[in-house]
Image (tube, grey):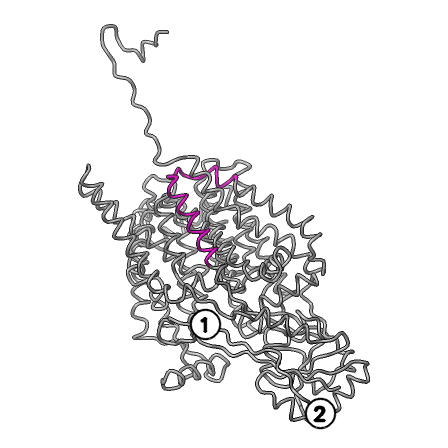
C-alpha cells in the first residue's frame, strides 16, 4: 500500500520515518491503580458516614440499617472516586506503587499490633472508645441515666463525668459523631478488639491517600518517599494505636485533596464525570466537619478555591462549592443536634471559625459576581496600578516564593518576640503549672508554649525535613503559579493553599495542653503531611537541578545521588526519633479489667462511686460497657440515706473506690480489690521529646452494702 505524496515525499528521495511519540515515564495502569486506591477510601468512608448520621440521630444506627442504607452509598461514593482517580492519574512506576502499598500496610499492621487498650477513661481515646462501644450496642449517642434505680434524682448524686455532659435525664458524649460511628462499626466487625484497631486501618488508608496525592503532583518515586517519611513520624503511629479521631481526619483531608487535584487538572472539563468529581471532592472535604470541629478551617480555606474557579467560568467551581456546602451543613447539624454541649463548651474557638467562614463566603460570592461582570479587573487596575493580568501573573511566582519564605522566617523567630499565652486559672493553665513543677521549672500557667510548635515538628520529622519543606513549598508555589506547562502544577496551587494555610494556623495556635506526645496529635491531620509532601518536593527540585547542571549520564548520576541524600535526610531522623517508642504498648490489660469488673455485678445491683478518680475513670465503663446503673456520690455523709433509697427502689448498692479502699471501709463495708493493674502509659513532657512510656497504676475496690 503506497503512502500519499505529502507523506512519502518526492520520488527518489528517502524520507526518515516519523519519530514515535515519547512514551510516558512509568505505567499508565500503575498510575490508575494508585489514583483509584488513594481516592476511594476517603470518599467511601465519608459517603457511608453521611448517610449513617441520620440513622444515628434517629437512634437507628444498627448493623441492619447501616448495611442496607449506608454501606451501599459508601460503596457507590468509593466507586465514583476510584473511577475519577483512575481517569486522571499520571503514569507511575510499578515499584513506587508497591512501596506505597507496603508502607501503608506495614504502618497499619504495626499500629494494630501495638494498639492501646484505653478503656479506663483518662484521655480522649478512652472517651472515643467508650462512646463508640455504646453506639455499637444501642444505636444512639444518647446515654440515659436510670435515676429510678437509685430512688430518683438526688442532690448528693451526680451522673456526668469527663467527656459526658448532663442533659436532663441523659448524658451527651463529647466530640463529634464521625469517629464514634467508625469505632462502632469496628466493634460490630471484630468486637472490642476491632473497635480498638479501627484507627490503625484508617492510618494505613491515610498513608495511601498521601501517596496518591504526592504521585499526582510529583510522580511515583516522590509518592513512595513522602508516604514513608510520614509513616515514620511517631505522632502518626501514636494516634493510630488509640481511638483518636486524627487518623480518620487525616484520611478524609488527604483523600479529599487528591480528588480536588483530579478535578482541577482534569482534561474532561464540563463532562458528567468532571462535575460529579467536583461535587464529590467538595462533599468529602466539607463532611470532614463530622469528624472534628477544626475541619471548618479547611472548609473555609476552600472557599477562595471555589471562587477562583467560578470567576474563571469553570464548571467545577460551582459544583465544588455545592458539595462543600452540603458537607459542612451535615457537620453543622451534628454540632447543633447531637454534640451541642461539647460545641458550646468550645464556642470561643468555633464561633470565630463559623462567622469567618460565612463572611468569607459572602465576600467570595461578591467578587465572583464582579469578576464575571468585568468590574473586578477594572477595580484591580485602579487600586493596584496594574496594566493587566499578564503583569500580575509575571509577579505571581516571585511573590508566592517570598510569602513562603517570610512565613517560615516569622515562625522561626517567633520565640524571640511572642510567647503563647492563656488564662493561668483555666484547666490548661493549671495543667501546665503542674507539669512545670514536675520538670523543675518555674510555674507559669499562662504559657501555652505555642511558639515552640516548629520544634515539635522537628522532634519527629527532623530539622533537615523542615528546611527541605520550606524549600519545597517555595518551589511548588512558584511552579503552581507559573504551571510550566504541566497539569500537575495546576493542582499544586489549591493543595498548597489548603495544607499550608491550615498548618500555619495550627502552628500559630495549636489549642492544646502542651504535654507530649499527647499534644502532638494536633500535627497529624495536616501539618505532618504538609511537611512530608513539601520536603519531598524539595528533594525532587534538588534532584532536577542536579540533573540540569550536567546533561547526560553525569547528570542522571548526580540526580540519583542528590535524591538518595535527600531520602536519607527525610527518613533517618524520624526513624531515630520514633525508634524508642515503636515497640511500646500502652494501657494493656484494661479491656480484660473492665470485663472482670462487669462480671462482679449482679442484675439488681447499682454502683455508687465514692471518690473523684472513680467518677472520672469508671463512670462510663460501668454504665456503658457493663450496663450497671452508675452515679457518683458528691457528699459521702449522705451515703446511709442514699443506700436506703436504693434499697427502697428494690436494688442493692455496691460502693466503688479507685484511689484507696478506705473510702469504702470508712463506712463499715468490707472492700474487695477487683482490679490491680500496672500498665504503662504515654509520658508527659513539656520541653523535650518523649522517649519512653511511664508506669500507671489502675486499681478498683468494690464493697457490697448487704
Question: Which residue in the structure is indicated by mark 1?
Answer: 682
Instruction: Say whether disc 2 or disc 1 marks the residue closer to the N-terminus.
Output: 2
Q: Nearer the viewer, residue 378 or 522?
A: 522
By secondary structure, the bulk of the magenta-drawn segment is best described as helix
Question: Which residue in the structure is indicated by mark 2?
Answer: 638
Q: Residue at x 24, y 49 (%)?
A: 562
Q: CA distance from mark 2 to mark 1?
A: 38 Å
Q: Secondary structure at mark 1?
A: strand
Are the residues flagged by discs 2 and 1 in contact, CB closer than 8 Å? no
Q: Nearer the viewer, residue 402 or 40?
A: 40
Determine if residue 392 is in view.
yes
The quadrant where residue 485 appears: top left
Magenta-highlighted residues: 83-110
Left or right of residue 568, residue 197 in this image: right
Based on the picture, tell me whether residue 590 belongs to the magenta stretch.
Answer: no
Q: Nearer the viewer, residue 384 or 676?
A: 676
Amino acid at each position: 500500500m503506497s503512502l500519499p505524496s505529502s507523506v512519502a515525499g518526492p520520488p527518489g528521495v528517502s524520507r526518515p520515518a516519523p519519530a514515535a511519540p515519547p512514551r510516558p515515564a512509568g505505567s499508565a495502569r500503575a498510575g490508575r491503580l494508585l489514583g483509584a486506591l488513594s481516592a476511594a477510601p476517603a470518599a467511601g468512608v465519608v459517603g457511608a458516614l453521611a448517610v449513617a448520621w441520620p440513622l444515628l440521630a434517629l437512634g437507628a444506627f444498627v448493623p441492619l440499617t447501616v448495611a442496607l442504607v449506608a454501606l451501599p452509598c459508601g460503596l457507590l461514593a468509593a466507586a465514583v472516586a476510584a473511577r475519577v482517580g483512575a481517569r486522571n492519574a499520571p503514569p507511575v512506576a510499578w515499584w513506587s506503587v508497591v512501596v506505597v502499598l507496603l508502607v501503608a500496610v506495614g504502618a497499619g499492621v504495626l499500629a494494630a499490633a501495638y494498639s492501646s487498650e484505653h478503656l479506663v477513661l483518662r484521655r480522649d481515646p478512652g472517651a472515643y472508645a467508650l462512646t463508640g462501644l455504646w453506639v455499637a450496642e444501642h444505636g444512639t449517642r444518647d446515654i440515659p441515666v436510670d435515676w429510678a434505680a437509685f430512688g430518683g434524682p438526688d442532690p448528693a448524686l451526680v451522673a456526668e463525668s469527663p467527656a459526658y455532659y448532663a442533659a436532663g435525664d441523659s448524658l451527651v458524649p463529647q466530640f463529634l459523631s464521625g469517629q464514634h460511628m467508625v469505632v462502632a462499626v469496628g466493634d460490630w466487625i471484630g468486637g472490642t478488639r476491632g473497635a480498638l484497631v479501627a484507627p490503625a486501618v484508617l492510618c494505613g488508608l491515610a498513608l495511601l491517600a498521601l501517596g496518591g496525592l504526592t504521585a499526582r503532583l510529583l510522580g511515583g518515586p516522590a509518592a513512595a518517599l513522602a508516604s514513608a517519611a510520614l509513616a515514620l513520624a511517631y505522632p502518626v503511629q501514636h494516634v493510630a494505636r488509640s481511638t483518636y479521631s486524627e487518623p480518620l481526619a487525616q484520611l478524609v483531608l488527604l483523600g479529599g485533596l487528591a480528588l480536588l487535584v483530579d478535578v482541577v487538572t482534569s482534561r474532561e472539563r464540563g463532562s458528567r464525570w468532571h462535575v460529579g468529581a467536583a461535587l464529590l471532592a467538595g462533599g468529602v472535604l466539607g463532611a470532614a466537619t463530622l469528624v472534628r470541629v477544626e475541619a471548618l478551617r479547611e472548609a473555609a480555606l476552600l472557599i477562595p478555591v471555589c471562587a477562583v474557579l467560578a470567576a474563571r467560568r469553570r464548571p467545577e467551581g460551582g459544583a465544588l462549592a455545592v458539595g462543600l456546602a452540603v458537607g459542612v451543613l451535615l457537620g453543622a447539624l451534628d454540632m447543633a443536634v447531637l454534640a451541642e454541649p461539647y460545641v458550646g463548651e468550645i464556642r470561643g474557638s468555633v464561633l470565630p471559625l463559623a462567622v469567618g467562614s460565612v463572611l468569607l463566603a459572602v465576600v467570595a460570592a461578591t467578587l465572583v459576581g464582579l469578576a464575571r461582570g468585568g468590574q473586578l479587573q477594572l477595580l484591580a487596575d485602579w487600586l493596584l496600578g496594574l496594566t493587566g493580568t499578564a503583569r500580575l501573573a509575571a509577579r505571581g511566582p516571585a511573590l508566592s516564593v517570598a510569602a513562603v519564605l517570610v512565613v517560615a522566617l516569622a515562625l522561626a523567630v517567633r520565640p524571640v518576640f511572642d510567647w503563647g499565652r492563656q488564662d493561668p486559672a483555666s484547666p490548661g493553665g493549671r495543667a501546665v503549672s503542674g507539669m512545670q513543677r514536675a520538670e523543675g521549672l518555674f510555674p507559669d500557667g499562662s504559657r501555652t508554649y505555642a511558639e515552640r510548635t516548629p520544634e515539635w515538628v522537628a522532634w519527629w520529622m527532623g530539622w533537615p525535613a523542615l528546611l527541605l519543606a520550606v524549600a519545597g513549598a517555595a518551589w511548588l508555589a512558584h511552579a503552581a503559579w507559573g504551571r510550566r506547562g504541566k497539569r500537575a502544577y495546576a493542582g499544586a496551587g489549591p493543595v498548597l493553599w489548603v495544607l499550608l494555610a491550615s498548618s500555619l494556623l495550627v502552628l500559630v495556635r495549636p489549642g492544646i495542653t502542651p504535654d507530649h506526645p499527647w499534644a502532638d496529635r494536633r500535627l497529624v491531620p495536616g501539618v505532618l503531611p504538609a511537611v512530608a509532601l513539601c520536603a519531598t518536593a524539595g528533594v525532587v527540585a534538588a534532584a532536577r537541578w542536579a540533573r540540569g547542571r550536567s546533561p547526560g549520564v553525569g547528570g542522571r548520576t548526580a540526580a540519583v545521588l542528590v535524591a538518595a541524600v535527600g531520602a536519607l535526610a527525610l527518613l533517618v531522623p524520624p526513624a531515630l526519633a520514633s525508634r524508642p517508642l515503636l515497640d511500646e504498648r500502652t494501657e494493656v490489660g484494661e479491656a480484660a479489667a473492665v470485663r472482670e469488673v462487669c462480671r462482679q455485678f449482679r442484675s439488681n445491683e447499682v454502683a455508687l462511686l465514692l471518690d473523684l478518680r472513680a467518677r472520672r475513670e469508671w463512670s462510663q465503663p460501668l454504665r456503658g460497657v457493663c450496663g450497671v446503673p452508675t452515679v457518683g456520690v458528691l457528699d459521702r455523709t449522705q451515703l446511709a440515706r442514699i443506700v436506703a433509697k436504693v434499697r427502697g427502689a428494690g436494688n442493692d448498692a455496691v460502693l466503688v473506690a479507685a484511689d484507696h479502699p478506705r473510702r469504702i471501709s470508712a463506712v463499715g463495708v468490707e472492700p474487695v480489690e477487683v482490679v490491680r493493674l500496672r500498665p504503662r502509659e504515654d509520658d508527659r513532657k513539656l520541653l523535650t521529646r518523649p522517649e519512653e512510656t511511664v508506669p500507671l497504676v489502675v486499681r478498683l475496690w468494690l464493697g457490697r452494702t448487704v
